[in-house]
Amino acid sequence: MCFAENPIFYACSKHIDIHHHFVCEHLASNKVILNHCASKENVADIFTKPLVKLQFVALHDRVLGVV
């Protein structure tokens, strides 16, 4: 998030795709707001990380609306 909000890093980031700069422009114009999502609340972790059973079940139930 800091990288996207800080234009000073631009000189070091010329290799980054146009999508990054698109997001930066929208952040600057307040069209997009980035929020931190803790890992224990991030349902995408089901697909991207090995989880202990308790955390997997909690996120799985949250996706299904069981909570």
Image (cartoon, rainbow, N blue to C red):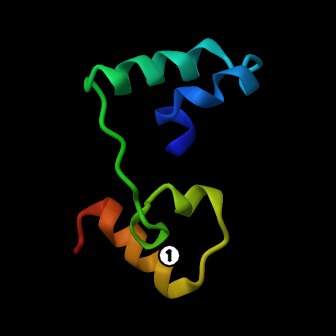
Judging by the rendered image, the residue that carries numbered circle 1 is: 56
The answer to whether 59 is drawn above or below residue 15 in the figure is below
Residue at 46% x, 23% y is 24
Residue at 44% x, 73% y is 40
Residue type at tag 1 = Phe
The image shows residue 16 at horizontal and vertical percentages of 70, 21
So how many labels did they put on this image? 1
Residue at 24% x, 71% y is 66
The image shows residue 44 at horizontal and vertical percentages of 50, 55
Q: Residues within 10 Å of mark 1 (few under 14, many from 20)?
A: some
Residue 8 sits in quarter: top right
| Left or right position of 22 against 58 | right
As rendered, which of 34 and 50 lies closer to the eye?
Answer: 34
| Left or right position of 58 against 47 | left
For the C terminus, which image quadrant?
bottom left
As rendered, which of 31 and 29 lies closer to the eye?
Answer: 29
As rendered, which of 19 and 49 lies closer to the eye?
Answer: 19
Residue 43 sits in quarter: bottom left
The image shows residue 45 at horizontal and vertical percentages of 54, 61
| Left or right position of 36 against 49 | left
SS of the residue under disc 1: helix
Residue at 60% x, 12% y is 18
